[in-house]
Image (tube, rainbow, N blue to C red):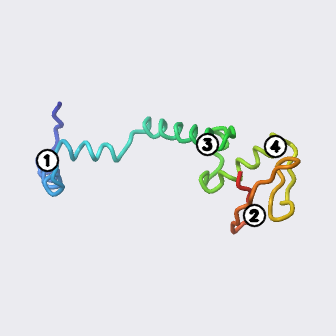
Amino acid sequence: MTTIQVPRATRDHLAELAKERGLSIGQLVEALAAEHPTAAQLAERLAADREAVRRVIGVGISDEEFDQTPDVRGNIYTIAADKVRTTRGTASWPPGPAGRAAIGPTSHVPLRRTVEGDQPLV
């Protein structure tokens, strides 16, 4: 344990907040610190999240591709589908019969409907 030097008014304010929440001041400060990760902690989480996405979808998306895509969560299927089409080189676009995009000679992937149009679910 250690001591943090703060003005008396700040200490009193923290004490009141802690009391209202049924915590000690130390527990309150610990909770506040947990809610505000450091830049290094954020970078670590981002790297872990990106690795999880790569592992789950089975497609190697570079950090540059993640950085260049403003809404990765909203565009992850599109990014993955583009990678698969590029890698396999056998895909046809626009979608084939029955609302499906041809990914290989005999395999098909269902589409999701979006405002922008059909997007492959890869």
The residues bearing labels 3 and 1 have C-alpha atoms spaced at a distance of 47 Å
Image quarter hosting the N terminus:
top left
Q: Residues within 10 Å of mark 3 (few under 14, many from 20)?
A: few
Secondary structure type for disc 1: helix
Q: How crowded is mark 1: few (under 14 residues within 10 Å), some or many (20 or more)?
A: some
Image depth: mark 4 or mark 3 in front: 3
Amino acid type at image mark 4: Thr
Image spot of residue 57 (x, y percent)? 65, 44
The residues bearing labels 4 and 2 have C-alpha atoms spaced at a distance of 18 Å
Image-based side of 79 in relation to 67, left or right: right
The residues bearing labels 4 and 1 have C-alpha atoms spaced at a distance of 59 Å
First-in-chain label (2 vs 1): 1
Secondary structure type for disc 4: helix
Residue denoted by label 2: 118
Image depth: mark 4 or mark 1 in front: 4
Image depth: mark 3 or mark 1 in front: 3
Asked if disc 2 and disc 1 are in contact, CB closer than 8 Å, the reply is: no
Residue denoted by label 1: 11
Image spot of residue 37 (x, y percent)? 38, 42
Amino acid type at image mark 2: Asp
The residues bearing labels 2 and 3 have C-alpha atoms spaced at a distance of 22 Å
Question: Nearest the camera: 74 or 9?
Answer: 74
The residues bearing labels 4 and 3 have C-alpha atoms spaced at a distance of 19 Å
In which quadrant of the rendered view does residue 88 lie?
A: top right
Image depth: mark 2 or mark 3 in front: 3
In which quadrant of the rendered view does residue 60 lie?
A: top right
Secondary structure type for disc 3: helix
Residue denoted by label 4: 86
Image spot of residue 3 (x, y percent)? 16, 34
Residue shown at the point (76%, 54%) measured from the top left: 109
Residue denoted by label 3: 56
